[in-house]
Amino acid sequence: MADAHKVRLEPVGVEFEVEHGETVLNAAFRQGIALPHGCKEGQCSACKCVLLEGEVDMLKYSTFALNDMEKDSGHILLCRSIAYSDMEVELLNYDEELLAKAIAVKTFKGRISHKENLTHDIRGIEIELSSPMKFWAGQYVDITVTTEKGETITRSFSMANTPDQTQKLSFIIKKYPEGKFSGELDSGGIRVGAEVSVVGPYGTCFRREDREGPLVLVGAGSGMSPVWSILNDHVRSGEKRAVYFFYGARTPDDLFYLDRIADLVSGHPDVKFIPVLSHADGNGAWDGERGFVHQTVDAVLKQLAIDGAGDVYACGPPPMIDALQPVLFMNGFETERIFFDKFTTSSGGKPGH
Ligand SMILES: Cc1cc2nc3c(=O)[nH]c(=O)nc-3n(C[C@H](O)[C@H](O)[C@H](O)COP(=O)(O)OP(=O)(O)OC[C@H]3O[C@@H](n4cnc5c(N)ncnc54)[C@H](O)[C@@H]3O)c2cc1C
Ligand code: FES
């Protein structure tokens, strides 16, 4: 068997081993070391860092995550890197709290115990695990389902429940036209009673405790899932902060959880819910915010004039996150106070190499 190689992380000085053929990110997960990451499959760029020493081979990735100029200047994606020697890497935007809160990734057996229609294309499901899984609000797992033809499909989904519920996990899943995994929601693979495999927890967009300033939550579509977990976990914690919960959707028919949100807001006057519709059709039936969610976030942040003194958690489709980031920077937020998960799809983006 080929030898394992050593990986040294700068500026933190942490060292760990990577087996032959294993990605550097998976080796870290296996050993309970939390490195910056998002999609884990070369699509989002969250794991980008600089190779200071050593040789790596990169598996297929999207040039949206790492362009050729970055590659030529020594940048690599840890989720795609296979080590061919000992290596030293410099982490970019390293977050100390991430390492301190690392939870080793494990595989769990699960059974789908509940399924409900939340909108015409959004479903809620619950999975009962055979043993408890510790996680932080905002994290996600990889779920593998088996289709009726016996094919297995794995995708990432964020928990919608709070971390005190460790053995029954709930998820909010959007159906994509021709989506392989989400297509199983209404055609057999994802049915009550089906056995699934769950691997996790993953994700860096989890709720940070004891911070100052307002909490800004931004979700769109199934991005409600981690944001709902973070919101409820915050409320349970008893911390006192103003909360601005923005939710972007197309039409009134795409909104869901309105009763639950109304209940939560009525008991917690610090929480303000701001739904924003991009296609409200101008028929007068909608008297809330119109446009894209990042535009409303911009307007509200300008009014609040908090100049970045708060924390932002944003989850949902990549274009929403890409539009939001410059808005946050312009409103004074530093990267250390912005946490996000881009819900990249496996087929999204062009294959790079
Ligand atoms: C960190 C993270 C957390 C996530 N959390 C959630 C969550 O909580 N809820 C949720 O619903 N989703 C979440 N996702 C997204 C989820 O993992 C899946 O990507 C999503 O459900 C789509 O999977 P699918 O198999 O249904 O679609 P896929 O089969 O992967 O296809 C996705 C889309 O691409 C289109 N497509 C397929 N093939 C091609 C092609 N060759 N060229 C162009 N387009 C194509 C399909 O029509 C479809 O619209 C998350 C993703 C990440 C990375
Ligand atoms: S985690 Fe590596 S590119 Fe997304």
Image: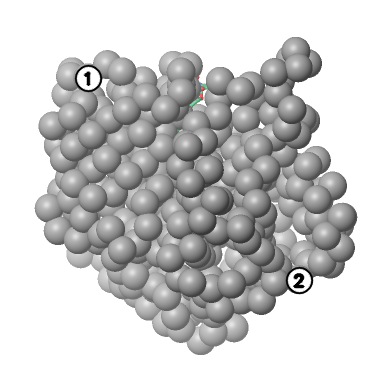
Contact (CB < 8 A) between labels 2 and 1?
no
Q: Which residue is drawn at 63% across and 69% down?
A: 241
Circle 2 — which element? loop
Q: Residue 118 carries which label?
A: none
Give the CA separation, mark 2 to mark 1. 47 Å
Q: Quadrant of residue 200?
A: bottom left
Q: Residue 309 carries which label?
A: 2
Q: Which of marks 2 and 1 is nearer the N terminus?
A: 1
Q: Mark 1 points at which residue?
A: 188
In the foreground, 158 or 285: 285
Name the spot of residue 308 as percent of width and height, x first: 78, 67
- Seen at 60% across and 33% down, the residue is 349
**Image quadrant of residue 74?**
bottom right
Image quadrant occupied by the C terminus: top right
From where the camera sits, is residue 318 visible?
no
Question: Quadrant of residue 182 in the image?
Answer: top left
Quarter of the picture holding the N terminus: bottom left
Question: What type is the residue that disc 1 sits on?
Answer: Gly
The x and y percentages for residue 323 are 75, 42
